Amino acid sequence: MPTFDVVSEVDLQEVRNAVDQASREVSTRFDFKDTGSGVELGDGELLLRSSTDDRLKALVQVLEEKLVKRSVSLKALDYGPVEQGAKGSVRRTAKINAGIADAKARSSTSSSRTWASRVSRRRPRATSCASQARRRTTCKP
């Protein structure tokens, strides 16, 4: 059975550039003035903070737009729950996934094995004149 390798890496320089762009946009946009909104890049995770839940959702949208423009897959981010902070502020962490988790890899491997076994059990279909006519070829008896 042929094998294949899946490589799932995130370019951290592009993530850093996207975070910088999002921070710059948040600091200049009128709807983010005096909300304390910001994005910080930590060690393998992003910290998003804002004064209200609505501003936090808008901040996530701005960040995702910048990541997409930088060709960083949004599947690489694993968002945590929204946490309440001091004085009614909210924050949320987003873990940057590099690679495939062991549990996910095992489940995908087992599902591909069952899929391969189903494919190998199929029998080839006999071609008839009707199926050849659909493919616009001539049928010779």
Image (cartoon, rainbow, N blue to C red):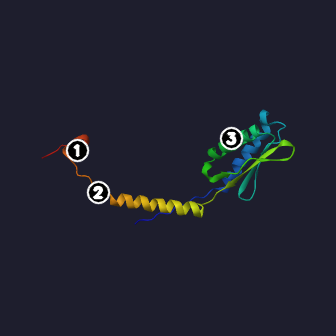
Q: Residue furthest right?
A: 87
Residue 93 drawn at (x, y percent): 73, 51
Q: CA distance from mark 3 to mark 2?
A: 49 Å
State whether residue 67 is above or below residue 33: below
Visible in this render: residue 101? yes
What's the CA distance linking mark 1 and mark 2?
18 Å
In this orientation, which residue lies closer to the viewer: 84 or 56? 84
Residue at left 76%, top 38%?
Answer: 55
Tell me if residue 114 comes above or below residue 131 in the rendering.
Answer: below
**Contact flag, marks 3 and 1 (Cβ < 8 Å):** no
Q: Nearer the viewer, residue 86 or 69?
A: 86
Q: Which residue is mark 3?
A: 61
For badge 1, the amino acid type reads Gln
Name the element at disc 2.
loop
Q: Position of residue 22 (x, y in %)?
A: 73, 44
Q: Residues within 10 Å of mark 3 (few under 14, many from 20)?
A: few
| Nearest to N terminus: mark 3 or mark 1 | 3
At label 3, the amino acid type is Gln
Q: Which residue is mark 1?
A: 132
For the residues marked 3 and 1, what is the alpha-carbon distance in whole angstroms?
51 Å
Helix, strand or loop for disc 1: helix
Identify residue for label 2.
Answer: 123
* Secondary structure state at the residue bearing disc 3: helix
x, y (%) of residue 73? 60, 50
